[in-house]
Image (cartoon, rainbow, N blue to C red):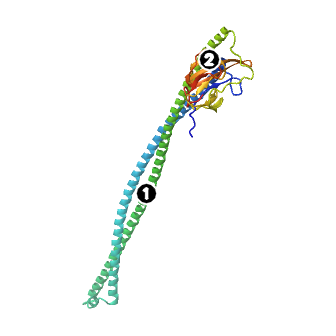
Amino acid sequence: MRARPLLLILLVLANLAWTQPADPREDKKRIDAELAQTGALLETASAEAQHALTRLAELNQALPVARQRAAEARGAVAAAENQAAASQRQAEAAQAVWQTASHRYDVAADRVNEGRVRLGRFVAVTYQGGDIAEFNAIVGSAGPAEFMMRAEYARKIAEHKKEAVDGLVGALWDAKHVSNETGMAKRAADAAVAAAKAALIEAAQARDEAEHSARDLADLVSRQQAAVAGAESHRSDMLERYEEVKRESERIAAELRAWEAAQAQAGHPGPVLQPGARLLMPVRGWKSSDFGQRYDPYYHVWQLHAGMDIAAGGGEPIYAAADGNVASAGWRGGYGNYTCLSHGSYQGRSMSTCYAHQSRILVNYGQWVSRGQLIGRVGTTGASTGNHL
């Protein structure tokens, strides 16, 4: 079952169990209180808007710094990438030199091994009698002088072969030394590559963090801009509401002067309600909101609700709660189509009932109405969100 649409409607009734005293003078007090409250809300909204603007200025000041840090971090990444590439090239060059030196060492080692094998064979042949022809050539010399000459020749051949092997061994050690040095250079280059890659990873992480911070700050600036717009809009709404209440206060003041003049000219305060008199329920419906502080569904702020709401369908008849004169009938800003009846005095105080947000007003200013007389119909005019009185 769908609930009936409701709207802010004012019913001001005075000095009874469910009433609030209200004549033009009481109306003036009420509207002045609402004006003061609206002014306070406007001041709060202005302060909130100023705070939002200040925060936005701080964020806008921080954003270029964050973007500069992100740019510097990207530059650091580019430098690290260049360093890593240079280190990689150096490592590749060192690898090539080391491979060449290693190859030279391997060749020298092979030659030394071959020389050692040949020398060993020569010694074995010489001392084990393996080379008979050479031995006979020495022994079969014509005389001692020739013998000595041939023996010396054989010795020199052996020494020459040994020197050749020693030379190969020296070349081998030289190749080993070069291989060791180039190996150290290669390991240093590999370490430089590893360090450059680690620096690149660290720089990339710093870049990502800086860019993430810059994006977050930019998002925060965007949200704060929306907050500023919302605060400014709220302040504008409150200013508009304040001006509306102020105009209403001035209008009621004028009506009050006219009403007081009419009362003075009549020579009496109007009809007098007898003790124990009860007011008629002005419309068929149910009470949906009381008089007092509440969250206003129309203005979306906490403020005084200066009346009582009665939920009713649009067009439902509105009846006078008691006999009285029509003190006001017409448009009243946030109250929409508004009628106020003056019922005279009750227990020494003047009293009136007022009916807001009507779809139609069926009485005129100064008209006398009787209790239960049709004076208007329920609507949703003015600052209202649905049909009600």
Tell me the number on the disc at residue 192: 1
Visible residue check, residue 316: yes
Mark 2 highlights which residue? Answer: 326
Identify whether 132 is placed above or below 92.
below
* Residue 178 place in picture, x, y as percent: 38, 65
Number of residues whose C-alpha sits closer than 10 Å to that of mark 1, classed few (under 14), some (14–19) or many (20 or more): some
Q: What kind of element bears circle 2?
A: strand
Amino acid type of disc 1? Ala
- Say how many tags the image has: 2
Residue sitting farthest toward the left = 142
Q: Quadrant of residue 283?
A: top right
The quarter holding residue 277 reads: top right
Q: Quadrant of the N terminus?
A: top right
The amino acid type, in three-letter code, at marker 2 is: Val
x and y, in percent, of residue 214 in the image = 48, 42
Q: Is residue 256 left or right of residue 116?
A: right
Q: Is residue 239 visible?
A: no
Percent of width and height locating residue 354: 63, 22
Query: In the rendered view, does 103 fall on the left or right side of 194?
Result: left
Q: At numbered mark 1, what does the secondary structure look like: helix, strand or loop? A: helix
User: Mark 1 to mark 2: distance in Å?
Assistant: 98 Å
Q: Position of residue 232 (x, y in %)?
A: 52, 30
**Quadrant where the C terminus lies?**
top right
